[in-house]
């Protein structure tokens, strides 16, 4: 998939910089749009000027400080483990939504309210 997307981007003149880091404090809005300084961690960075910037970082379940440690609920890889009907290992404690780490989308969470 990555190779196919990279080729399609290249044809459209879109460059991909991998293993890249940028300093959010260095983001500058200017007449041409936005500029960021990007480069490999610990390596040489260079400035990229673009019309628009899309921030698409990953997401994680917000399961800290909600008292899970006082229950038998099992957490694996940062998400609460549930069975086919959303029950955790703690009787009477069900979990739905982003905290169970399936598809992290609102309508998926809504469906999980009434599992099949
Ligand atoms: C930038 C962005 C864009 C998105 N766009 C889309 C989209 O276009 N379409 C789509 O389907 N999904 C989208 N999502 C995903 C969608 O928002 C989530 O999948 C959905 O909100 C998950 O619902 P949830 O009920 O699991 O969690 P949330 O909606 O995050 O609800 C959790 C609630 O619990 C509260 N809470 C947390 N800790 C505590 C606590 N200790 N005590 C009391 N309350 C607490 C929080 O304040 C929050 O209100 C997007 C998410 C982001 C971040």
Image (cartoon, rainbow, N blue to C red):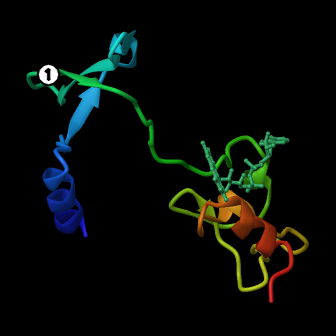
Which of the pair 31/47 is nearer the observer? 31
**Quarter in which the N terminus is drawn:** bottom left
**Residue 18: percent from the left, percent from the top?**
19, 44
Instruction: Report whether 102 appears left or right of 2.
Output: right
**Label 1 belongs to which residue?**
45
Quadrant location of residue 97? bottom right
Instruction: Report whether 38 appears left or right of 29.
Output: left
Seen at 68% across and 49% down, the residue is 63
**Quarter in which the C terminus is drawn:** bottom right
Which of the pair 86/39 is nearer the observer? 39
Seen at 78% across and 74% down, the residue is 111
Which of the pair 39/10 is nearer the observer? 10
Measured along the vertical axis of the image, is residue 113 above or below residue 45?
below
Seen at 24% across and 62% down, the residue is 5
Q: Residue at the right extreme? A: 92
**Residue 34: percent from the left, percent from the top?**
35, 19
Quadrant location of residue 80? bottom right
Q: Secondary structure at mark 1?
A: loop
Which class describes the residues within 10 Å of circle 1: few (<14), some (14-19), or many (20+)? some
């Amino acid at each position: 998939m990555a190779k196919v997307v990279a080729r399609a981007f290249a044809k459209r003149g879109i460059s991909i910089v991998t293993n890249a880091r940028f300093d959010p404090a260095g983001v500058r809005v200017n007449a041409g749009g936005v500029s960021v300084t990007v480069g490999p961690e610990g390596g040489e960075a260079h400035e990229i000027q673009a019309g628009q910037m899309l921030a698409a970082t990953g997401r994680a379940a917000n399961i800290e400080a909600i008292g899970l440690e006082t229950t038998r609920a099992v957490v694996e890889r940062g998400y609460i483990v549930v069975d086919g009907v959303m029950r955790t290992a703690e009787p009477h404690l069900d979990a739905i939504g982003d905290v169970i780490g399936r598809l992290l989308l609102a309508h998926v969470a809504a469906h999980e309210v009434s599992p099949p």
